[in-house]
Amino acid sequence: MNWSDFGERNKRLNPLWSLGAGMNLGELQPYKEMIALSVLLQVYYLELESNERRAREDLVELTWISLERFNIAKFGTAESVERMVDGLLWSGNGGDFEAFYYDDAARQMAVQKYKYFTVDEDATRSSWEETGKTVYRLSEYAMELIFMSHEIIDEFQISIKLLEIQMHIKHGRVTRAMQDVNELISRVRKMIQQQQEYRNALRRNPKHMFSEYGTARHERLEEIHQQFAEERKHFDNIHRSLARLANDEKDVIDFNELRQLSERVELSRRVHDELAGVVLSIFETETNLRLNYPELFWGAAGFNFRTNVWEEWVKAEGLPDGDSLETLVSGLFTPNQDFIYPLAWAWEEQDVGFLPEEYLDEPEEAMGEEPAVYIPKSIPWPEVKSLWYPVFAELAVQGTFTFAAESFSEEEQKRWAETPDAVDLWIQFFHADIIVQEHAADADSGADEPQKLIRQLMADYPGLESLRGKRLRTSIRKIPTVSVSWPGLEMSPYTITIVEN
């Protein structure tokens, strides 16, 4: 086990484990963790909107909103709600929260200090002038809890993520903004891939338009257009915030980091534009199919196994167990069990019972002619050996050979492309280690084609005798390289090597 990151994992989870701990909330006690998380989330969204209603009195009001939402307001009292808020703002001794974690570098237990809320100095400065109240914001530890909960949501709204990035830039948190931009780019690219898969499925079968996913997309058309408009506005605000940050904090912010963040934001905008293009092209395709090809959606008359059984029943609902599949398809591929004749008789009936009419009128002498002898296709060993000899010759000298363009002349490349039997032997060598026989007499026992090739090469070329007893192994070259691509042939760059026993 890798213990080097255990302490960091411990420190990330401590605020989660301690959330709501040590509070005595009376009848609200069973729900304290859920209520605490709901308050953190509400403050999180208030921060995204730059709403400064985050004083202690506001947190009390947010707690009551959560209780009403969860239908447990009847269990709450003014005292228990205020105790909940105070338990989020401060620990029991009025200071930071504390928890143990294992410091791997020091190899001993250490104490971690953290808070869920810190003072929002910018907002508090203006608030004191008007109301004299302290405004709070989420600490980095509380933000980490929010981000951890986001990670389990696949379809986190893009517009909310853009607001997060804008908030980080506003507060000068360039590194956090960079991480969020990279995460957003990955998420949008995943959505592009999903949309493209749906578009390809729609082209193969227009009936996917009426699937649950296609219907939901059609109903959300106006919502999607509105989301794209909001995203353009958010990107404009992000660029303005970046320009303002570069202007106002030029002595504090690393300009190189700011430039990289600006480039990533621009890349994110282009990826969003690509997503918008894919989505709108799908709607265009759906509209075109509905208007110009309505016959594609007409139901086919009759009943067939593929549509009515396999696609609409088996693929959609599945089968109760594995034996059900055998019961389903056995009638398609096996004879009925109560058939009067054995299966061999049935095949014989097919062979001799349906002769063409022209053969029925011929005399028995003509029908008694010997059938043509079938000669199976064999490997053209002379041509194959001439192509493989340079491979084994270099293997005997160098200990290795790689099938690459630079290893053969243009004439040899043409011959390899015209001899698929020679190419196929590379794949057979790749499947397992090949041990060259110690003695020539033993080679007769090798019935597979690689052993036959080696036996014939060593018989024709005595210079290859040094390979006897060697173990040959074939692999695909691991270093980045282009696959072998010649006219009429494309394959991976195989390397055959002599390995020590």
Image: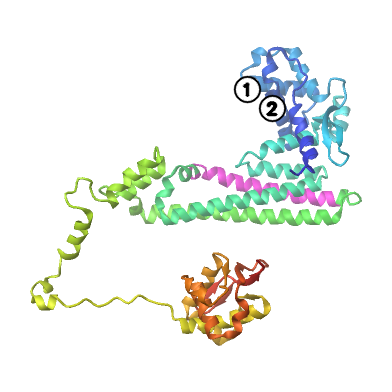
Q: Is residue 242 magenta?
A: yes
**Residue 298 appearing in the image:** no
| In-front residue for pair 168/242 | 168
In this rendering, would 337 be left or right of 229?
left
Q: Nearer the viewer, residue 18 or 450?
A: 450
Q: Quadrant of residue 480?
A: bottom right
| Residue 69, numbered label | 1
Estimate the spatial distance between the alpha carbons at disc 2 and disc 1, rounded to whole Å: 10 Å
Which is more N-terminal, label 1 or label 2? 2
Q: Please name whichever residue, 415 or 78, is drawn nearer the observer in this view of the structure.
A: 415
Residue at the spot 47% in from the left edge and 76% down from the top edge? 421
Is residue 374 found left or right of 413 in the rendered image?
left
Q: Quadrant of the C terminus?
A: bottom right
Span of residues in magenta: 217-246
Q: Amino acid at mark 2?
A: Ser
Foreground mark, 2 or 1, reads 2
Q: Position of residue 295 (x, y in %)?
A: 33, 53
On-image quarter of the N terminus: top right
Q: Using the image, determine if residue 142 lies above or below residue 339.
A: above
Disc number at residue 10?
none
The answer to whether 422 is drawn above or below residue 68 in the figure is below
Q: Residue at x 80, y 34 (%)?
A: 139
Q: Which residue is mark 2?
A: 38
Q: Residues within 10 Å of mark 1 (few under 14, many from 20)?
A: few
Identified by mark 1, the residue type is Arg
- Image spot of residue 260 (x, y percent): 78, 56
The residue lying at 10 percent from left, 71 percent from top is 360
